[in-house]
Image: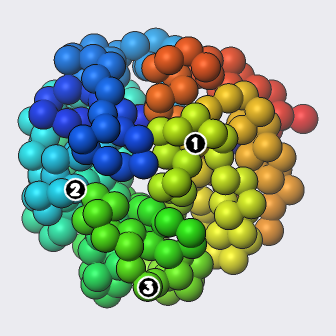
Amino acid sequence: MLVIPAIDLKDGQCVRLKQGRMEDSTVFSDDPVKTAGHWAAQGARRLHLVDLNGAFAGVPINGEVVKTIAKAYPQLPLQIGGGIRDLDTIARYLDNGVTWAIIGTQAVKNPAFVAEACKAFPGHIIVGLDAMNGMVATDGWANVSNVNVIDLARQFANDGVEAIIYTDIARDGMMQGVNVAATVALAEASPIPVIASGGVSRIEDIHALQVVARTHTGGGIMGAITGRAIYEGALDLAEAQRFCDAAQNR
């Protein structure tokens, strides 16, 4: 299982939000490129980037920062979400060194777009499903739909999606622990591997997810995204990844 640091981009800075609220942000760095290098040095094997401005605007806003990170650390795979609404945007990101594009809002509003993207860019598409009380949210979490997260995930089973990032909005940035039960339910209901997100705040969260990753049915849990916890020191990235590696080899 991978432990994946999050770099959330707002106005060119590295921030963390609480429950997706743009007005409730904490700036952790004004140099996202340096931050990416820090996590690479700590043993990160993948970075999770989010263009927060782009998620609300519907078009990429921090694309140049993402391009610079990809150029600075070509050995480090990147996944990017926020404002990805068309194939041209995906193509630009991949051309600029990003490995996976994350489709969120469009996956809810136009599920057929996911299949189209997977066909155009096989192996490079991740779906991001963000939920409040089991219902999918869109547009930077500004709107909660009447679509059930598990029902939607099942629609993508045969499209060629590489992974599903599942975020429990109520837990995100709140340092309250990951919603293991909801993450497991999704992982067992879908054949697509799941990346847990939202509330991954301590080593016990990694332990709980790793147990499921080793004994799963369905697609299983392939990773966990963490943000505020590693920035504030509540979770040690290197230690967490070492634990996962050791558990995997048992």
Q: Is residue 82 above or below residue 186?
A: above
Label 3: few (<14), some (14–19) or many (≥20) C-alpha neighbours in 10 Å: few
Mark 3 or mark 2: name the one nearer the start of the chain: 2
Q: Which residue is mark 2?
A: 55
In terms of image quadrants, where is residue 206? top right
**Image position, residue 12 (x, y; %):** 14, 30
Q: Which residue is mark 3?
A: 146
**Image position, residue 160 (x, y; %):** 46, 74
In terms of image quadrants, where is residue 187? bottom right
Label 2: few (<14), some (14–19) or many (≥20) C-alpha neighbours in 10 Å: many
Gap between marks 3 and 1 measured at Cα: 23 Å
Of labels 3 and 2, the one closer to you: 3
**Image position, residue 60 (x, y; %):** 12, 52
* Mark 3 vs 1: CB contact within 8 A: no
In the structure shown, which secondary structural element does the residue marked by tag 1 occupy? Answer: loop
Mark 3 or mark 1: name the one nearer the start of the chain: 3
- Residue nearest the viewer, comparing 244 with 118: 244
Q: Is residue 247 visible?
A: yes
User: Which corner quadrant holds the N terminus?
Assistant: top right
Q: Residue at x 58, y 42 (%)?
A: 199
Label 1: few (<14), some (14–19) or many (≥20) C-alpha neighbours in 10 Å: many
Of all residues, the one furthest to the right in this rendering is 250
Name the mark on residue 199: 1
In terms of image quadrants, where is residue 183? bottom right
Q: Residue at x 44, y 73 (%)?
A: 136
Q: Is residue 163 visible?
A: no
- Residue type, numbered disc 2: Ala
In the structure shown, which secondary structural element does the residue marked by tag 3 occupy? Answer: strand
Gap between marks 3 and 2 measured at Cα: 20 Å
Q: Residue at x 36, y 49 (%)?
A: 20
Q: Residue at x 68, y 18 (%)?
A: 239
The answer to whether residue 196 is left or right of residue 182 is left
